[in-house]
Structures are given as C-alpha cells and as structure tokens.
C-alpha cells in the first residue's frame, strides 16, 4: 500500500531534502521517524530535491507499507518525534502506481527579498540595502522566459539530466513595501535554476544586464553568461500540483 505525506520545513539547519551520508537532511529525519513508529524500514520518495538552506511550505513524498495505517494517529506521533522546523500536515492513502516525483504536473517557488534589514527574517530572506532595483525592467525580463524552453544557462554545471527543457507557466515580481517576491511556476526545474534566474534578473534590475542581454544569455545555453546564484535562504518551494483525478486529500 502506498501513502502520500504532505509536509513543510524550514531548511536553514539542513543540507536539503535528499539523503546524504555525511550531512543531516529532511529525508533522513522523516525516514527515521516513520521507521521508528511503523517498526519497519521506511524509505520516503520525495517530489524532488531542494538544496541546502532552501525551505518548503508545501512538499510531498510517498512511502510503501504492507498494512493499513491509522493516519491521524501517525501524524500526531511523527510530529512529536520530528524537530520543530519540520511538520507533517497530512498522510493519506493513494494509488500504488502514483509517484510523488514523476506524477507532479507543476511546481511553484517564491524567492523572498527584504529591502533593508530585519533580524527576524534573517534566515528566510535575502536582505538587500543600498541597491536600487528597476522592478519594471525585472518583470519585462521575466516575461521573456515564456518565449524559451531550454534553460541550460540557469542550470548547475555537470548536472546529469536528459533535457534542459522546462515549460514556465508563471514568472513575476511583486513588491509590498519592503518585501520583494519573485513568483515562478513550471512543469519542472533544473538544479539551481530558480536562484540563477533570480540572480540574473537582479542584474537587470541594477542595469548591469539589458533585456537584449537577457535574451542572449538564455540563447547561449552557457551558465557562465548568467548572473550569480542568489542565497538559498530566500527560496521557498510553495506548491506542487498533481492531476486531480489521482490525488484527493
């Protein structure tokens, strides 16, 4: 029997979602908590990787068991074991052939920038001072993303993927007083892609990169031409969608 687990986490203290032999990850802690409670080895399969320091307000994973689970009781117990910066919202039974990663139809991220200094958001925003940004130009550049599919220029080098193609469905900046947030949705993302996109758009906002330059960067398919990767702490995975006919919480 297969179950989905819906959770969220603050990634500050972790080396990302995916298990690593010499570092603490979210996947490792969730595996340990479920294995302890269910008294068998549980290996959760996540919807995708998040890098060290990246957060998720919505994340899904699946795991398999041989017996029916009392889900409400398990949710309560697993949250009692997990650290306070990881929370399980729901556990529910799904079809045995549903895959948390491969059946996802889209993923949404937010990149959060605080224009100034705020000690209470130091772990969850990239804080910028003394830098004026042309947000209108940044949004014009963001619109250009819809014209392309190959985003190799924003991918981490030496990544083992079959294709660099992604279909971007949303890309826009919104300013609310001192909070500047970039919203982006696509069917899939390359490793480090969102942080590299944001870094390149920031260069547009400061006038370092023109709209024409931005197009040339994408068309070059060369990571060295794009802007720097912005800090991980401002990045949030906020939504993962699945076909409505195969998932129903």
Image (spheres, grey):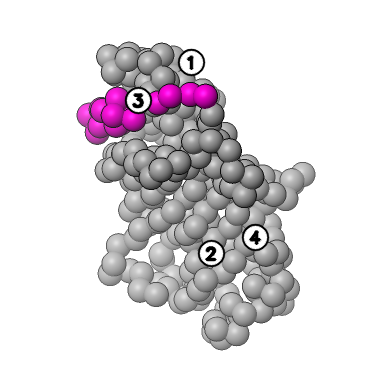
- Residue under numbered circle 4: 85
Disc 3 to disc 4, C-alpha distance = 35 Å
Which structural element holds mark 3?
loop
Of the two numbered discs 3 and 4 on the same chain, state the one appearing first in sequence. Answer: 4
Image quadrant holding the C terminus, namely bottom left
Of the two numbered discs 1 and 2 on the same chain, state the one appearing first in sequence. Answer: 2
Of the two numbered discs 2 and 3 on the same chain, state the one appearing first in sequence. Answer: 2
Mark 2 residue crowding within 10 angstroms, few (<14) / some (14–19) / many (20+): some
Disc 1 to disc 2, C-alpha distance = 35 Å
- Residue under numbered circle 3: 134
Disc 2 to disc 4, C-alpha distance = 11 Å
What span is colored magenta in the figure? 130-150
Q: Nearer the viewer, mark 2 or mark 4?
A: 4
The answer to whether residue 190 is visible is: no
- Residue under numbered circle 2: 7
Which structural element holds mark 2?
strand
| Magenta-drawn stretch, dominant element (helix, strand or loop) | helix
- Which x, y percent locates residue 44? 58, 62
Q: Nearer the viewer, mark 3 or mark 4?
A: 3
């Amino acid at each position: 029997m297969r179950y989905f687990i819906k959770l969220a986490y603050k990634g500050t203290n972790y080396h990302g979602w995916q298990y690593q032999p010499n570092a603490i990850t979210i996947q490792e802690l969730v595996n340990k908590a479920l294995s302890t409670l269910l008294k068998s080895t549980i290996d959760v399969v996540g919807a995708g990787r998040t890098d060290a320091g990246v957060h998720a307000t919505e994340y899904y994973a699946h795991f398999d068991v041989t017996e029916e689970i009392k889900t409400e009781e398990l949710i309560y117990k697993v949250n009692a074991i997990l650290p306070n910066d990881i929370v399980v919202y729901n556990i529910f039974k799904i079809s045995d052939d549903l895959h948390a990663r491969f059946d996802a139809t889209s993923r949404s991220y937010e990149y959060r920038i605080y224009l100034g200094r705020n000690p209470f958001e130091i772990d969850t925003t990239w804080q910028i001072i003394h830098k004026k940004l042309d947000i209108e130009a940044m949004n014009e550049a963001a619109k250009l993303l819809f014209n392309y599919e190959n985003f190799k220029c924003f991918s981490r080098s030496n990544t083992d993927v079959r294709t660099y193609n992604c279909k971007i469905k949303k890309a826009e900046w919104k300013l609310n007083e001192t909070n500047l947030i970039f919203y982006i949705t696509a069917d899939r993302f390359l490793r480090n892609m969102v942080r590299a996109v944001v870094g390149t758009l920031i260069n547009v906002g400061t006038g370092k990169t023109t709209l024409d330059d931005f197009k040339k960067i994408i068309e070059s398919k060369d990571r060295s031409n794009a802007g720097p990767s912005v800090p991980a702490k401002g990045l949030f995975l906020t939504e993962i969608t699945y076909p409505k006919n195969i998932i129903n919480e």
